[in-house]
Image (cartoon, rainbow, N blue to C red):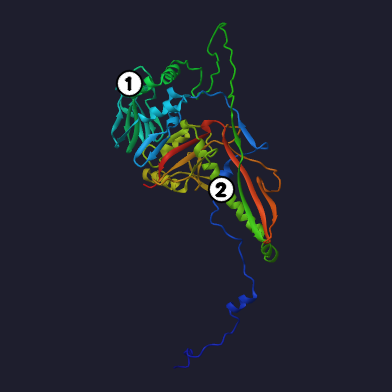
Amino acid sequence: MTATEPDTDVEQTPLSLSTAAARKLSSTTKTPPQMQGITSRWLVRMLPWVNVEAGTYRVNRRLTYAVGDGRITFAFTGADVRVIPQKLAELPLLRGFDDDSALGALADRFVQRQYEPGQVIASTGELAEQVVLIAHGKVNRIGRGEYGDDTVLGILADGEFFGGNALAPDETTWDSTFQAVTPCTVLTLSRRSLREITDQFDHLRAHIDRTRNQPRPPQNKHGEAGIEIASGHSGEPRIPGTYVDYELAPREYELAVAQAVLRVHSRVADLYNQPMNQTEQQLRLTIEALRERQEDELINNREFGLLHNADPRQRIHTRSGPPTPDDLDELLCRRRRSRFFLAHPRTIAAFGRECNRRGIYPQTVELAGRQVHAWRGVPLLPSDKIPISDHGTSSILCLRTGEEDSGVVGLHQTGIPDEYQPGVSVRFMGIDDRAVISYLVSAYVATAVLVPDALGVLEHVEISR
């Protein structure tokens, strides 16, 4: 060993205090408790909120005539499908008919059929001898275009139907061709089967005849009661008198509640409250979870959630499956002043793939100090509360917002007793015999669609391709 080489065999004596020993005399630098479940909650942030002081929000509208354009619901038992009898009242000529025995007999006469992609279900010019209910799948309605070629006039999917006028006694022909785009399961009712049922139930035949011959009241293209206006006249013709009729039973929205009981042991609150207030941190995380549940309810609640309250005429389907620029354009054109899209993050990624495939680069816009994706200048915002089905499909929502624009609004109530944050109350419930302190954390929320075209939904969006 030379004089310049270090002596590796001899353990060197520490020259300073080690970090392990120093940490015993030092306090750590801590973060507040973190939570993975916090999302951007764009829907809660973007909705204009209306303070509902009375707890109930009534939406007054012009009188609208029901035209039988709802959705049909089915019961699935394995591979067998049956239409729910009461939902047959969604067919135009059965609107308002409520005899369960007659509707049940009709439901029993529907025949289940399967169609593969490309197969024709009904052809233009043929006799319309049946009503067709689409239980599952997607169907193109094809007609003759302006220049003589075939063009897709519309897309029908789960729960929709065609041939409703085939229930009328007069023979008619199909005005379009209906072709399966995906594997389809449909239920059909022939004119002959209907005739046999009406022979058994005279009041069913009378209802169909009465509905068919009933004059249609004056209305605009949205189904609202017409307002008579004269224009383009000269001289002294009689000016029509008119008035604006209102719905006699407008819809009312009641605030829904989301609640939790927060429990904190008094020993924790007394002894371990520094440097962070344990109760405050527990409340903060509980309220974050409450806000997440609120957004979930705004989207998925069956009473007021956006997915369940979109008008059937504002529900459209993708042309090819994945979300394309064409589909978002179709969604935009159905309403004025669209404020934003709302989609699952995986759906936004699927839209980006379709744009890349076409060599299109969507723009971004600044919103609340952040850069977000946009299409045609309308922000495309993420929300993981929009469900994804087992088949890898989801939905994209498009909203116009605000009372002044007859849009979508959020409903809450501020100034409630023991208010901790706007619309959130924290009430002390006492201390039990185990020295556990309880707090009731409550928030009240709902959403309202003021007119049907304020909300549109692009359904059956494939995101797994």
Helix, strand or loop at disc 2?
helix
Q: Position of residue 74 (x, y in %)?
A: 41, 35
Say which residue label 1 marks: 173
Which badge, 1 or 2, is on the more N-terminal residue?
1
Helix, strand or loop at disc 1?
loop
Say which residue label 2 marks: 293
Using the image as rendered, state which of residue 290 and residue 264 is in the foreground. 264
Q: Looking at the image, is 398 positioned above or below residue 168?
A: below
Q: Mark 2 Cα within 10 Å, few/some/many (few <14, many 20+)? A: some
Q: Mark 1 Cα within 10 Å, few/some/many (few <14, many 20+)? A: some
Q: Amino acid at mark 1?
A: Thr
Numbered marks: total: 2
Q: Is residue 39 left or right of residue 73?
A: right
Q: Position of residue 167 (x, y in %)?
A: 38, 22
Asked whether residue 58 is in view, the answer is yes
Using the image as rendered, state which of residue 233 and residue 344 is in the foreground. 344
Q: Is residue 254 left or right of residue 428?
A: left
Q: Tell me where residue 170 sits by quadrant.
A: top left
